[in-house]
Amino acid sequence: MKILVVSLLKRKVTPEIPAARPRIIFEISQGLVKKGHQVSLLGTADSYIPGVEIIPVIEKSFVDMPAFENPFYAETAYLVKLAKKIEEIGNNFDIIHNHTYPEFINLFSAKNIKTPIISTIHAQAFPEYDEALSLFPECYHISISEAHKKLFKKAKIYKVVYNGVDTNIYSFSQKKDDYLLWLGRLSKAKNPDGSFMDPKGIKWAIKLAQETGSRLMLGGNVEDMEFYNRDVKPHLSDKIKWIGPVSAELTLTKPEIATLMQKAKAFLMTINWYEPFGLVMAEAMSCGTPVIGFDRGSVKELVINGKTGFVVSPDKGIEGLKEALKKIDTIKPQDCRDHAVANFSTETMVNNYEKTYLEILKL
């Protein structure tokens, strides 16, 4: 098949980029090339995927360019250019796989070309997003978990395809250290009372470490330094440490993240929001590391309670996390690894997308 993968413009796609959406685009594209397909990527000129033709819309990603005088106008102008490029070249391909941030801009092109567009929905569902996607019933919307799919009330979801991780990079380790690991984003979103929303739940991880005397490694991207300075930095100590620079972009490399996960006693998925998928859970289990997570979003789809970690009712709060941590040594690292390889590997993801393409082409 000739496949056009439509990328985001916010970030480039290269082997080393750790951000979730570029990683998924990279893994799918490279996997399709390995299976013998002809793949082109429509996105930033500085993107690089071995064996993939890069069709540039912009020289560099938004995060790598100098600040625009009017970011909203500039970024939407480039997104419009991207959508028009799809109309220009779309009929040269058998299938178009859309991953742009936001996804719905490119869907305006669907009625103007013959090539079907499948669109992976990477972001969390919310009413305005749901309604926007529902305006394009001719496109094939893909959710990344069943929990994610259920949140869309108006948009028609064609099917669920789980994300995948490179199980070679996130390789197995039987031997563990005694620390807990939390990786995530410190969002700049705030509650009505002015407190930080903390969708990824770093405060829960810190509280668990403090109340159990556990070592805790923290890391991620900091969207708002005030959040870090107010809610994280005061709690850092010999036992609770922030790994890597404090930056708006994730600076830890994939091998560095893999090493942290391989040695962790448990990975903490103490989320306060409905996680659409959660690559970090798949990565941790691929390394043989169990996950302790709140039962929100996709957590119970990825984690087998009592076998690859523990799914904790949010109502139980810190006590539920403590109970899970007491039992963490009952989880076998090999069970975590086997579950991740069977269900959340790059190969499984690519195979499922390939099947989806072929299904759609037969319709």
Image (cartoon, grey):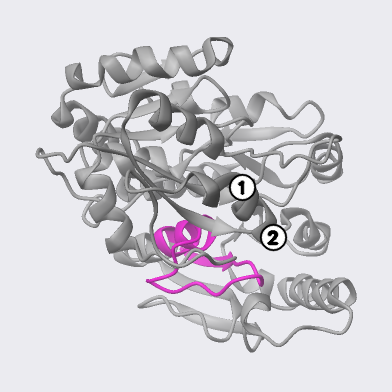
Report helix, strand or loop for mark 1.
loop
Kindly identify which residue carries mark 1. 122
Instruction: List x then y, in percent, for residue 339.
Output: 26, 30
Label total for image: 2
Can you identify the residue that label 2 sits on?
101
Q: Does residue 171 lie above or below 47 as drawn?
A: above
Q: Position of residue 311 (x, y in %)?
A: 42, 18
Q: Are marks 1 and 2 in contact (CB under 8 Å)?
A: yes
Residue drawn at x 77%, y 56% is: 107
State the CA–CA distance, disc 1 to disc 2. 8 Å
Dot 1 alpha-carbon crowd within 10 angstroms: few under 14, some 14 to 19, many 20 or more: many
Q: Which residues are magenta?
A: 1-28
Is residue 326 rendered magenta in the image? Answer: no
Question: Does 291 sit left or right of 205 as displayed?
Answer: left
| Residue type marked 1 | His
Left or right, 95 with reference to 163:
right
Mark 1 vs 2, N-terminal side:
2
Q: Nearer the viewer, residue 235 or 17?
A: 235
